[in-house]
């Protein structure tokens, strides 16, 4: 067995919004092909951590490494970094005036310089993968929330990222549409995509993740395998959180 490759790592990461200390000395790493799920109450810092890992928020101190390279926001080309680290948000942010196919080819053609022909070929494969091959000419307004989110996933995958971040990808969806998005994410996990997922879907966390991290007030309070964390949490705060939601 070769050495396990760390895809993304945070060391002593701190983030403030004004006087509010949102992330407190976060140490955290994700190995290649792993799925790491962040759980915790709203306001515990999960989404902020994710946004720092993609440099949508800038840390105040600490270090973020992508594939063992420390990223300095002042010196590194963040657009290049973001090509490696795809992100799917709670709200889908699709271009309303572009068809599904046009949404998916936008990044590769505009940012990566992929030829339009190749981008279309790739996009069709990705839309097939997320179960939307028949929707390529449709505009977002005609799609359900679950379909929009699956287009957003295809759009992120079109950049061929090495890591995918998901920030509560199902929380804006009607309950009956959550399953189709989670199925798409499960399929990605099975293929070995490295993923960090902030979610309230504990069934997904239990079934798909390699590691679950419980965050509380800006700190990682406990981390473990899904069976350890859900069946035998060690920390009182973790126990209290899980008993409030399960």
Image: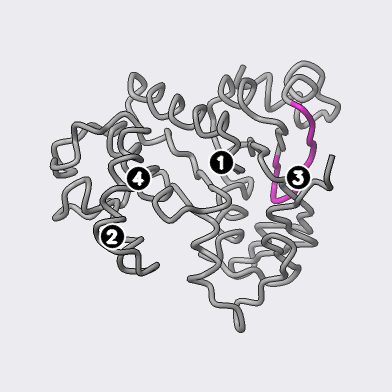
Question: Pointer 1: residues within 10 angstroms few (<14), some, or many (20+)?
Answer: few
- The numbered dot on residue 42 is 1
Foreground: 20 or 200?
A: 200
Marked residue nearer the N-terminal end (4 or 3): 4
Residue 63 vertical position relative to residue 181 in the rendered view, above or below: below
**Span colored in magenta:** 215-225
- Quadrant including the C terminus: top right
- Quadrant including the N terminus: top right
Query: Is disc 4 placed on a helix, strand or loop?
Result: helix
Q: Residue at x 27, y 32 (%)?
A: 132
Q: Nearer the viewer, mark 2 or mark 3?
A: 2
Query: Is disc 3 placed on a helix, strand or loop?
Result: strand
Q: Are marks 3 and 1 in contact (CB under 8 Å)?
A: no
Specify whether residue 31 is painted magenta.
no
Cα gap from disc 3 to disc 1, whole angstroms: 14 Å
- The numbered dot on residue 152 is 4
| Residue identified by numbered label 3 | 220
Q: Main secondary structure of the magenta part?
A: strand
Q: Is residue 166 left or right of residue 17?
A: left
Q: Residue at x 72, y 24 (%)?
A: 226
Q: Position of residue 233 (x, y in %)?
A: 81, 24
Q: Nearer the viewer, mark 3 or mark 1?
A: 3
Query: Is disc 2 placed on a helix, strand or loop?
Result: helix
Q: Position of residue 129 (x, y in %)?
A: 37, 33
Q: Residue at x 36, y 21 (%)?
A: 175
Q: Position of residue 12 (x, y in %)?
A: 80, 62
Q: Are marks 2 and 4 in contact (CB under 8 Å)?
A: no
Query: Is disc 1 placed on a helix, strand or loop?
Result: loop
- The numbered dot on residue 106 is 2
């Amino acid at each position: 067995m070769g050495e396990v490759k760390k895809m993304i790592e945070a060391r002593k990461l701190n983030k403030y919004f004004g006087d509010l200390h949102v992330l407190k000395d976060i140490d955290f790493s994700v190995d290649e092909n792993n799925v790491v799920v962040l759980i915790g109450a709203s306001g515990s810092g999960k989404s902020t951590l994710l946004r720092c890992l993609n440099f949508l928020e800038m840390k105040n101190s600490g270090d973020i490494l992508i594939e063992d390279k420390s990223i300095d926001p002042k010196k590194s080309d963040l657009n290049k970094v973001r090509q490696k680290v795809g992100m799917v948000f709670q709200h889908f942010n699709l271009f309303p005036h572009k068809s599904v196919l046009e949404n998916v080819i936008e990044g590769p053609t505009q940012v990566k310089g992929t030829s339009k022909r190749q981008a279309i070929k790739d996009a069709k494969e990705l839309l097939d993968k997320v179960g939307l091959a028949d929707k390529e000419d449709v505009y977002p307004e005609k799609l359900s929330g679950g379909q929009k989110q699956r287009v957003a996933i295809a759009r992120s995958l079109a950049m061929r990222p090495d890591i995918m971040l998901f920030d509560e990808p199902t929380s804006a969806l009607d309950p009956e549409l959550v399953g189709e998005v989670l199925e798409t994410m499960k399929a990605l996990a099975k293929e070995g995509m490295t993923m960090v997922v902030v979610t309230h879907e504990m069934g997904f966390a239990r079934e798909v993740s390699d590691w679950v991290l419980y965050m509380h007030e800006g700190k990682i309070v406990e981390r473990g395998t899904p069976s350890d964390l859900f069946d035998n949490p060690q920390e009182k705060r973790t126990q209290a959180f899980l008993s409030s939601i399960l």
